[in-house]
């Protein structure tokens, strides 16, 4: 099955208003160039950015949203209430976000996110019409102890325990923690092996057809130089890019590799 590729930029706590506008302007100029026009046409990749939440209003600014989708980095599992500091997924949606990240490793590492809470965020985002991108991945110690698959199974267990979930709108980003922001990318063989394993887990839980339609992204020190090889792997359907996504020209060069 041919799955549409997704090229997503996780800006984390970077880029303010002026910088984000300049990113979009440069990206739009780049997309208008003849050599890049195929990126903007079907079956070109979906392009998504995850800015700081306060910038999501830009998703509906004229001219900014034609080829670019916007997503929230973190959303809560209720529509409203006394949850200081959280972002209502309905607000993100109303501002124009179409995607929501859940369970990024920095949320797990620094803010107490658990396997259960990450999945709750993803499922609620889906319920209000956002497309959740659930992030999972093992630490270096876990990989070296041969626990990668067991860790991923534990991270996915709450998702598979929810009978009502299902694949529509969901994507999963495999981001080995040891590869995030370290410059140490997983080799395409390592990434493909994990992605094939993950697709197998989804097939067991939700059936082969659902597993085949699920977009599985890789993230962790993705750069212009390694994007092509990663994207050529049969089970890698897209990339979640941190540092390298802050440069619109590089982001576009990475997106160009999603065409081949
Ligand atoms: P990185 O971050 O590309 O800077 O390693 C990836 C991520 O955290 O999503």
Image (cartoon, rainbow, N blue to C red):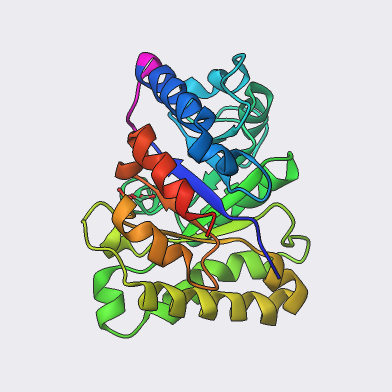
Percent x, y of residue 259: 54, 54
User: Which range is magenta?
Assistant: 13-18
Residue 223 shows up from this direction:
no
Q: Look at 35% across and 65% down and name the residue there.
A: 176
Position of 224 relative to 1 (above/below): above
Magenta: predominant secondary structure element?
Answer: loop
Left or right, 191 with reference to 260: left
The answer to whether residue 178 shows anywhere in this view is: yes
Q: Residue at x 55, y 41 (%)?
A: 47
Vertical arrangement, residue 258 with respect to residue 153, above or below: above
Asked if residue 17 is among those painted magenta in the image, a careful observer would answer yes
> In front: 227, or 176?
227
* Left or right, 78 with reference to 180: right
Q: Is residue 220 magenta?
A: no
What percent of the width, then of the height, locates residue 219?
40, 57
Image position, residue 37 (x, y; %): 57, 37
Q: How many marks?
A: 0
Residue farthest to the bottom, as pictured: 146
- Quadrant assignment for the N terminus: bottom right
Measuring from the top left, give residue 80's x and y in whole percent.
65, 28
Instruction: Please report the residue visible at 58 percent of the width from the left and 71 percent of the height from the top.
Output: 157
Residue at (36, 69) in percent of width and height? 138
């Amino acid at each position: 099955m041919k799955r549409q590729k997704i090229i997503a930029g996780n800006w984390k706590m970077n880029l303010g208003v002026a910088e984000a506008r300049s990113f979009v302007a440069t990206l739009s100029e780049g997309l208008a160039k003849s050599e890049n026009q195929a990126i903007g046409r079907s079956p070109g990749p979906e392009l998504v950015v995850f800015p700081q939440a306060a910038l999501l209003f830009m998703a509906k600014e004229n001219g900014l949203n034609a080829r670019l989708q916007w997503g929230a980095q973190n959303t809560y599992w209720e529509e409203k209430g006394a949850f200081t500091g959280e972002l209502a997924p309905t607000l993100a949606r109303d501002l124009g976000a179409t995607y929501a990240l859940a369970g990024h490793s920095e949320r797990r590492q620094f803010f107490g996110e658990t396997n259960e809470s990450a999945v709750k965020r993803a499922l609620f985002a889906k319920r209000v019409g956002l497309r959740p991108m659930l992030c999972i991945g093992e630490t270096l110690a876990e990989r070296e102890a041969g626990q990668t698959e067991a860790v991923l199974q534990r991270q996915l267990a709450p998702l598979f325990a929810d009978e009502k979930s299902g694949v529509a709108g969901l994507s999963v980003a495999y981001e080995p923690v040891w590869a995030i922001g370290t410059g140490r990318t997983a080799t395409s063989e390592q990434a493909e092996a994990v992605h094939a394993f993950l697709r197998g887990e989804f097939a067991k839980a939700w059936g082969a057809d659902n597993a085949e339609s699920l977009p599985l992204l890789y993230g962790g020190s993705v750069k212009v130089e390694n994007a092509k090889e990663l994207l050529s792997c049969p089970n890698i359907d897209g990339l979640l890019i941190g540092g390298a996504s802050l440069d619109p020209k590089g982001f576009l060069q990475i997106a160009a590799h999603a065409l081949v």
